[in-house]
């Protein structure tokens, strides 16, 4: 029996129940390949791949395959922002499937068409959720597991703590992945002991040698404490966890009165979120590439406190893998 045996490892074929979460702009091909090569699951973020790291998706996957032949996953944001975007995502899904990818994480929309395409090729789909109602909707559409985004996550965050979210969703009987708040091996073990089938980390993987984020971004993570992580509405219109930098303090974290009014409007919220997102995508890319010399904000979660040095992905995964075997047939 494998040393780590959970429903997630059985669904994906990976050795370790650890996901490197898809990150804009930090999911470079070398980081993804290093994570998968070490026995965990690297996730392709196609927008980051194409528009930050300048790899057309097919060529980016080929680049990853030059480094490792182990399982790699794919992140599909399925929000209906525009017909052009949806058509592009459908093409990306087809490319990923044709390249042999069989594990997909969907977010921010109806995953039914992704489920249909992936299941037809023998793959699995997990969906990002923060609440019971979103979990039920995703499972009704046929997803195989849930990425449980808690209130310690970086980027778009949830409102429930790790235990509360597990207790809320465990009754569905599908594999649950703990997303948020994991920065050291002990926290990984605690999540598995609680009953999670895997964990997803993002912030910890930014502070690795293989991640090509600017050194200023990595240093901001090393320097940060949990109290330095704040929520801002000014990136996408919904709360996003970032490190409190001078720019964040100057900009403020609350949307203005007009923006808040538009965000509550059934139609206006889509335009307001699009405006915030277009601006933040550019700023995130620039800060990741240029560092604090730019108007910088850095997405990060409350797992920052134990992160105090830059390590290789291989060293990081070895640290997390150490310890007694975990065999949980029902998790």
Image (cartoon, rainbow, N blue to C red):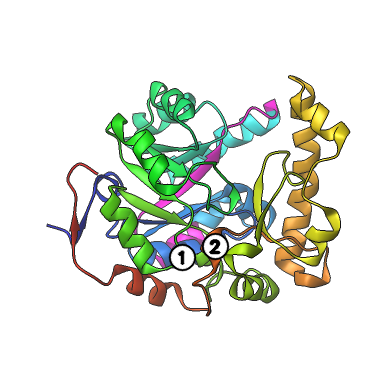
Label 2, secondary structure: give it.
helix
How many residues crowd around disc 1 within 10 Å: few (fewer than 14), some, or many (20 or more)? many
Residue at 52% of width from left, 25% of height from top? 110
Residue 195, visible in the rendered structure: yes
Residue 71 figure quarter = bottom left
Q: Point out the tag, 1 or 2, that comes first from the N-terminus.
A: 1
The residue indicated by pointer 1 is: 183
Residue at 32% of width from left, 48% of height from top? 196
Rendered location of residue 128, percent (x, y): 48, 39
Q: Is residue 258 above or below residue 222?
A: above
Residue 170 figure quarter = top left
- Residue 67 counted in the magenta span: yes
**Which disc, if any, is residue 203?**
2
Which corner quadrant holds the N terminus? Answer: bottom left
Label 1, secondary structure: give it.
loop
**Which disc, if any, is residue 66?**
none
Rounded to the nearest angstrom, the CA distance separating label 1 from label 2 is 8 Å
Rendered location of residue 150, percent (x, y): 49, 46
> Disc 1, disc 2: CB below 8 Å?
yes
Q: Is residue 127 above or below residue 17?
A: above
Please indicate whether residue 137 sits to the left or right of residue 251 in the image. left
Q: Nearer the viewer's eye, disc 1 or disc 2? A: 1
Q: Which residues are magenta?
A: 62-83
Residue at 74% of width from left, 50% of height from top? 281
- Residue 56 counted in the magenta span: no
């Amino acid at each position: 029996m494998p040393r780590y045996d959970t429903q997630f490892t059985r669904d994906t074929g990976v050795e370790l129940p650890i996901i490197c979460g898809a990150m804009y702009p930090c999911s470079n091909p070398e980081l993804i390949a290093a994570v998968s090569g070490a026995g965990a699951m690297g996730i392709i973020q196609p927008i980051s791949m194409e528009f930050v790291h300048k790899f057309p998706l097919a060529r980016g996957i080929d680049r990853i395959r030059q480094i490792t032949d182990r399982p790699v996953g794919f992140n599909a944001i399925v929000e209906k922002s525009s017909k052009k975007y949806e058509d592009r995502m459908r093409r990306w899904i087809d490319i990923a499937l044709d390249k042999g990818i069989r594990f997909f994480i969907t977010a921010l929309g109806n995953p039914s068409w992704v489920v249909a395409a992936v299941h037809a090729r023998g793959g699995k789909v997990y969906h990002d959720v923060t609440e019971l109602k979103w979990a039920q909707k995703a499972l009704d559409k046929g997803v195989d597991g849930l990425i449980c985004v808690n209130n310690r996550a970086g980027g778009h965050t949830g409102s429930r703590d790790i235990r509360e979210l597990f207790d809320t969703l465990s009754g569905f009987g599908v594999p649950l992945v703990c997303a948020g708040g994991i920065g050291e091996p002990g926290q990984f073990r605690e999540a598995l002991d609680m009953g999670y089938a895997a964990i997803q980390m993002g912030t910890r993987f930014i502070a690795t040698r293989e991640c090509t984020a600017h050194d200023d971004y990595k240093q901001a993570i090393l320097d940060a404490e949990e109290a330095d992580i704040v929520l801002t509405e000014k990136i996408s219109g919904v709360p996003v966890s970032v490190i409190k930098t001078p720019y964040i303090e100057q900009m403020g974290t609350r949307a203005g009165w007009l923006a808040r009014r538009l965000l509550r409007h059934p139609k206006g919220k889509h335009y307001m979120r699009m405006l915030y997102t277009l601006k933040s995508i550019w700023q995130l890319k620039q800060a990741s590439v240029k560092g604090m010399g730019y108007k910088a904000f850095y997405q990060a979660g409350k797992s920052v406190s134990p992160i105090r040095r830059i390590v290789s992905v291989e060293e990081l995964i070895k640290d997390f893998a150490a310890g007694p075997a975990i065999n949980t047939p029902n998790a």
